Amino acid sequence: MMLRDAIFAALTTIAFGLLYQVRTSILWIAGAIGAVAWIISYTINRLPAAGLLSNFAGAFVIGALAEFAALRKKQPVTIFVVPAIISYVPGYLVYESMVAFLKSHFNQGMFFGIKAIFSAAALALGLALATALLRPLLRPRHLNSRP
């Protein structure tokens, strides 16, 4: 079951990569990043009281693996990050929030809206932390690079 879902996560990432016209040789790497991130996110989500930790961990894994892949393939990090992170975006929560507001269910609309904001914040924090921690380690600046 988990393997099947990981394959679907990889295919979703590849589909978004095709939509953004990412080269085929890069698509498979981005798909693998999406699958690994989904496995980590799914595993953490099964823990009691995981909450937004699964979104944070998935985004962190995407950011970390994208940094490694970008360095290895000499490509921008965003080529790997964007297709893999799109499936995590809380669009359904925003949709549910808007529907609840339109039906005058303001408490439910606020609940879904705040949950979507916190989910997006967890994704942003995971990506930013992965970049902030790994980029200086992987791409050190030479002290004598400027005259």
Image (tube, grey):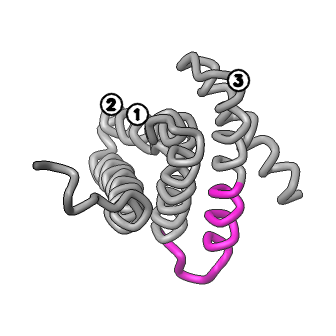
91 displayed left or right of 9: left
From the image, tell me which residue sits under label 2.
102
Q: Quadrant of the N terminus?
A: bottom right
Q: Are marks 2 and 1 in contact (CB under 8 Å)?
A: yes
Q: Secondary structure at mark 2?
A: helix
Residue positioned 31% across, 37% down in the render: 101
Q: Nearer the viewer, mark 1 or mark 3?
A: 3
Q: Nearer the viewer, mark 3 or mark 2?
A: 3
Q: How many angstroms separate mark 3 from mark 2 (CA)?
A: 42 Å
Local SS, label 1: helix
User: Horizontally, is 143 left or right of 24 in the view?
Assistant: left
Q: Is residue 49 magenta?
A: yes
- Which badge, 1 or 3, is on the more N-terminal residue? 3
- Distance Cα–Cα, label 1 vs label 3: 38 Å
State the residue in front, 138 or 103: 138
Span shown in magenta: 36-51
Tag on residue 99? 1
Identify which amino acid the numbered label 2 is placed on. Leu
* Quarter assignment of residue 36: bottom right
Q: Residue at x 33, y 57 (%)?
A: 128
Compare marks 3 and 2 and give the one earlier in the sequence: 3
Label 1 neighbour load within 10 Å: few <14, some 14-19, many 20+? some
Image quadrant where residue 94 sits: top left
Q: CA distance from mark 2 to mark 1?
A: 5 Å
Residue 88 in the image, given as x and y percentages of width and height: 52, 47
Q: Position of residue 25 (x, y in %)?
A: 71, 29
Numbered badge on residue 24: 3
Q: Is residue 66 visible?
A: yes
Magenta region includes residue 113: no
Amino acid bearing label 1: Val
User: Residue visible at 20% across and 58% down?
Assistant: 144
